Image (cartoon, rainbow, N blue to C red):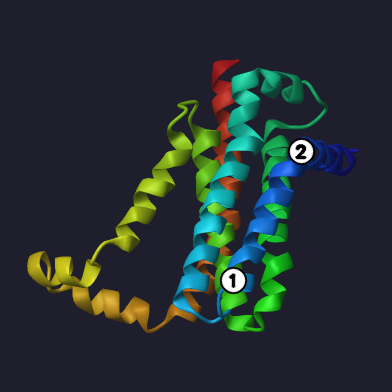
């Protein structure tokens, strides 16, 4: 019964957010059409669209339910709060991975596609985890602020203020595939941890 209810929740989300999913997925094709697939411009546009998609899907899947008051209705279903949150994560992943992979298969670069999947899984998970553990409307924006760090001249900053950190930075940069694999493994850990926190939080308030 729980699996069937979870599938119904995923189906409901797809019906509700089908248009944004289609719009963002179509947007992923734009850089593939207007630019060389392997160009930095194309990769940058793909990353930008995936950031927007991950954030908007995470916001829609959970925080919007809080804001509309429909989360309480979902909690009345014969599901543990833990199971409800995991169903919402499954819904999030189905949307995010669809958006990343449908256009991504046309890249012709399996390694880049692997990186895109690792990024969208981890980033969307962190965005939604923020909405699960906090009722604050700015919660899903915290990962965006963290992401800004990666657009800063990290090497120059480390070289000036903390030269010892350059070794760790260079080690990470030289093992990007391993970092991506760790990101994929970390995503479900964060999802499960936030689901457990949510369930225990509700129990403490009961």
Q: Residue furthest front?
A: 34
What residue is shown at x 41% (from left), y 48% (from top)?
Answer: 144
Q: Does dot 2 land on a helix, a strand or a loop? A: helix
Q: Which residue is mark 2?
A: 13
- Residue 165 image point, x, y percent: 19, 71
Inspect this view and state whether residue 190 appears: no
Above or below, comparing residue 155 to residue 84 in the picture: below
| The disc label shown at residue 34, or none | 1
- Which residue does the image show at 67% across and 38% down from the upper left? 85
- Label 1: how many Cα within 10 Å (few below 14, some 14–19, many 20+): few
| Residue closest to the eye, 141 or 183 | 141
Judged left or right of residue 28, residue 1 is: right
| C-alpha distance separating marks 2 and 1 | 31 Å
Q: Is residue 93 visible?
A: yes
Give residue 35's position: percent from left, percent from top: 56, 75
- State the image coordinates of residue 2 (x, y, percent, origin top left): 85, 39
Q: Nearer the viewer, mark 2 or mark 1?
A: 1
Q: Quadrant of the C terminus?
A: top right
Task: Tell me which corner region of the image, top left, top right, bottom left or bottom right, holds residue 117.
Answer: bottom right
Q: Which structural element holds mark 1?
A: helix
């Amino acid at each position: 019964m729980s699996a069937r209810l979870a599938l119904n929740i995923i189906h409901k989300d797809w019906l509700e957010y089908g248009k944004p999913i289609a719009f963002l997925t179509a947007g992923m094709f734009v850089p593939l059409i207007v630019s060389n697939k392997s160009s930095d411009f194309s990769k940058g546009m793909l990353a930008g669209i995936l950031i927007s998609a991950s954030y908007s899907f995470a916001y829609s899947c959970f925080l919007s339910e809080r804001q509309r008051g429909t989360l309480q209705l979902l909690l009345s279903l014969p599901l543990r709060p833990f199971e409800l949150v995991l169903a919402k994560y499954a819904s999030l992943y189905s949307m995010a991975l669809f958006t990343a992979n449908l256009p991504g298969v046309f890249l012709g670069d399996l390694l880049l596609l692997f990186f895109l999947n690792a990024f969208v899984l981890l980033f969307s998970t962190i965005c939604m985890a923020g909405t699960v553990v906090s009722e604050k409307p700015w919660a899903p924006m915290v990962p965006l602020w963290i992401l800004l760090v990666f657009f800063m001249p990290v090497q120059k900053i480390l070289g000036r203020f903390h030269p010892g950190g350059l070794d760790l930075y260079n080690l990470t940069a030289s093992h990007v595939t391993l970092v991506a694999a760790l990101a994929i493994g970390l995503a479900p850990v964060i999802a499960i941890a936030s689901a457990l926190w949510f369930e225990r939080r509700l129990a403490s308030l009961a």
